[in-house]
């Protein structure tokens, strides 16, 4: 998902960076498929959800206030929910 956001930012900023990102052998096809409405492969969705969960878990101790910790967990859950429920799952070969 981060690469999709990066591609969106690059498309509005510097087209050379966008072209560079889209030319990457692993990331380029994923971003192109997402932009075309084909969604993400199931494996990429699992990796994204797991990455969000790990990042939230590891950074939770750095937030000293309980309200901030709860808010951070809710933000992480919202991200996982978006990736799993709103982004279409691409089935089959690319």
Image (tube, rainbow, N blue to C red):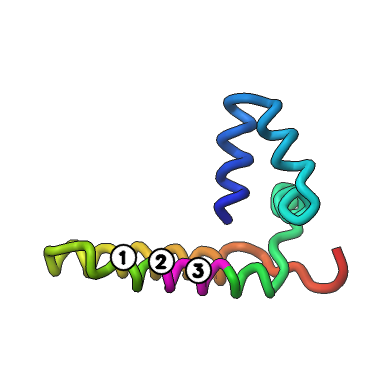
Q: Quadrant of residue 53?
A: bottom left
In the rendered structure, which segment of residues is drawn in magenta? 48-55
> x, y (%) of residue 51?
50, 68
Distance CA(mark 1)–CA(mark 2) = 6 Å
Provide the residue designation for mark 3: 51
Provide the residue designation for mark 1: 59
> x, y (%) of residue 28?
75, 48
Residue at 45%, 63% (x, y): give it: 79
Q: Is residue 30 magenta?
A: no
Q: Is residue 83 left or right of residue 93?
A: left
Q: Are marks 1 and 2 in contact (CB under 8 Å)?
A: yes
Residue at 66%, 31% (x, y): give it: 17
Residue at 46%, 67% (x, y): give it: 52
Q: Residues within 10 Å of mark 3 (few under 14, many from 20)?
A: some
Provide the residue designation for mark 2: 55
Q: Is residue 67 left or right of residue 89?
A: left
Secondary element at tag 2: helix
Q: Residues within 10 Å of mark 2 (few under 14, many from 20)?
A: few
> x, y (%) of residue 37?
73, 54
Q: Is residue 49 magenta?
A: yes
Q: Quadrant of residue 54?
A: bottom left
> x, y (%) of residue 59?
31, 65
Q: Are marks 3 and 2 in contact (CB under 8 Å)?
A: yes
Distance CA(mark 1)–CA(mark 3) = 12 Å
């Amino acid at each position: 998902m981060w690469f999709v956001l990066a591609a969106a930012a690059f498309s509005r900023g510097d087209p050379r960076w966008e072209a560079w990102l889209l030319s990457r052998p692993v990331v380029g096809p994923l971003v192109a498929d997402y932009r075309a409405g084909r969604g993400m492969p199931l494996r990429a969705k699992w990796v994204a959800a797991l990455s969000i969960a790990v990042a939230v878990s590891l950074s939770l101790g750095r937030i000293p206030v309980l309200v901030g910790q709860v808010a951070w967990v809710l933000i992480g859950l919202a991200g996982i929910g978006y990736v799993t429920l709103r982004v279409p799952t691409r089935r089959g070969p690319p």
